[in-house]
Image (cartoon, rainbow, N blue to C red):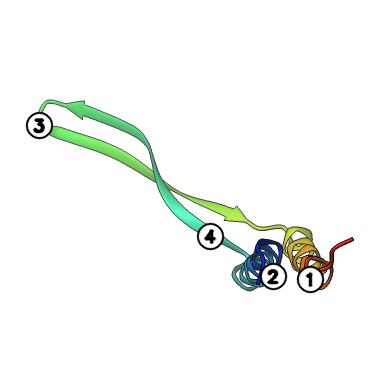
Amino acid sequence: MNLTRVIGLILIVAGIVALGMGGFSYTKETHQAKIGPIELAIKEKQEVNFPIWAGVSAIVVGGALLVFGGRKG
């Protein structure tokens, strides 16, 4: 299996994962204050969404690399 086909498989898997998950979230500490022994911290939950077109495009490009990646000339 050559490198082009491996990249194609990786793109297909990444596209399927992107469509399945839809996105991910993480917690970000935005403000912090210390007043003597008292600490105040505000944490915000941030979400990152994967566009549907990006997942579908990754699958299509990965499929094309699998089909046409091994051909020479």
Q: Which residue is mark 1?
A: 63
Quadrant containing the N terminus is bottom right
Precedes in sequence: disc 4 or disc 1: 4
Q: Which residue is mark 4?
A: 24
Position of residue 37 in the picture relative to residue 15 (left or right): left
Mark 2 and 4 residues: CB-CB less than 8 Å, in contact? no
- Please tell me how crowded label 1 is: few (under 14), some (14-19), or many (20+) other residues with Cα within 10 Å: some
> Separation of disc 4 and disc 3 at Cα?
35 Å
Mark 1 and 2 residues: CB-CB less than 8 Å, in contact? yes
Precedes in sequence: disc 3 or disc 2: 2
Q: Secondary structure at mark 4?
A: strand
Q: Position of residue 56 (x, y in %)?
A: 78, 66
- Please tell me how crowded label 4 is: few (under 14), some (14-19), or many (20+) other residues with Cα within 10 Å: few
Precedes in sequence: disc 4 or disc 3: 4
Precedes in sequence: disc 3 or disc 1: 3
Residue at 79% across, 65% down? 69
Vertical placement of residue 49 versus 59, above or below: above
Q: Which residue is mark 2?
A: 12
